[in-house]
Image (cartoon, rainbow, N blue to C red):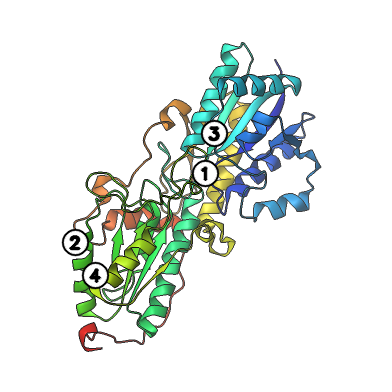
Amino acid sequence: MGAGNLVVIQAGGPTAVVNASLYAVLDSERRQKTSRRIFGSRNGLQGLIRGDLVDLGFLTSSQLELLRHSPGAMLGSSRVKPSEAELTGILRDLRERDIHQALFIGGNGTMHAALMISRFCKQANYEMQVVGIPKTVDNDINGTDRCPGYGSAARYVAQSTRDLGMDVRALAQPVSVLETMGRHVGWLAAASVMAKRSAQDAPHLVYIPEVPFEMDVFLADLDTTLRKQNWAIVVVSEGLRDSAGRPVYETSEASQRDEFNRALPGGVGHFLAETVTRRLKIRCRDEKPGLLGRASILHVSPQDRMDAELVGRVAHEALAAGCDEQMVALMPLRSGEPATTKLIPLEAVSGPDRAIPREWLGKGNPPTNHHFAEYLRPFIGELLEYEDVFDRSESYENA
């Protein structure tokens, strides 16, 4: 069998660099000067289910270059799990278009769907090659050192924490709670620690799902911080859970549920701000960048973009080499050396979301230690530095 045509799928939440992976695939295909067709699935897996595929051969070199630096997912995205009947329809469309290769750009759920489609095709004796390209701001894919998309989102969080600290310190509020994305893990919230240069700098308190949240401890820690200085920045992950594993906050609105009938994450920052106001009798604001944290092209980390392009090119090469049911994984960065990759089985990717390793968690607050900072620093990129001319150490009781 010849390679046949190729389809590319972008699925799950977009990132600031996911299109860089798509660019790398299309650019690699163009350089090979093949006569086959390369399709894009509109709106992720929904496009495969509906047979809504677009031929990407029309893109010019200048359009590809713009794609390389565009946030969002150019092909559109979705979060769905195909049913048996939908898998049958997908197979039918693949046959009709002579598609025998597929590249799935996404996270854990996407890799699971890729494996499911691959296995279904093989059971039907239809030859199909499937390779996964990692992508997520959550940094929770198993088997890879880091996930393209995370470095840029982490840089956004760290820089925003530093900037927010400068603002709140100038006109003490006195408390601002910054909520980051992260339904199950705290990689993004923890990235805020990179903003800190001294004890007075933001963030002052950071809370992540890996460490059970206790309201009374939080309020006591915040009170202690405010007795040392009259302002504080608190960074929290949207997926905070208590010691029983229950969400600290979860919306009860029926309209705020996703495709899998899960309550949409978010809102814990507002909930905590209201609690601080009520219990400590002080002013407290909440900030929620939300989608801005993964869409800001101005905060893209150079290494993150290079990683995104690298995994796209290696995935394309892997198909040409006959690899199947594999995902491209990034290896740890070594000082002064270019990024490297390896291929891991899609089977190995499935499982619980990768949390911050226990050995990178510290005691107290912030919740991470120097091992986490050493891990993140090489690929988060440089943050803007500011001149520190403030000296605000008075107690809020006397303000």
Does dot 2 land on a helix, a strand or a loop? Answer: helix
Identify the residue at image location x=58%, y=26%.
Answer: 130
Identify the residue at image location x=25%, y=54%.
Answer: 213
How far is the residue under mark 2 from the one under mark 3? 42 Å
Does dot 4 land on a helix, a strand or a loop? Answer: helix
Q: Is residue 381 visible?
A: no
Could you tell me which quadrant the N terminus lies in? top right
Judged left or right of residue 90, residue 79 is: left
Disc 3 marks which amino acid? Gly
The tag earlier along the polypeptide, 4 or 1, is 1
The residue identified by callout 2 is 217
The residue identified by callout 3 is 132
The tag earlier along the polypeptide, 1 or 2, is 1
The tag earlier along the polypeptide, 4 or 2, is 2
Does dot 3 land on a helix, a strand or a loop? Answer: strand
Disc 1 marks which amino acid? Lys
Q: CB of mark 4 within 8 Å of CB of mark 1? A: no
How far is the residue under mark 1 from the one under mark 3? 9 Å
* Residue 160 position within the rendered picture, expressed as x and y whole percent measured from the top left: 45, 68
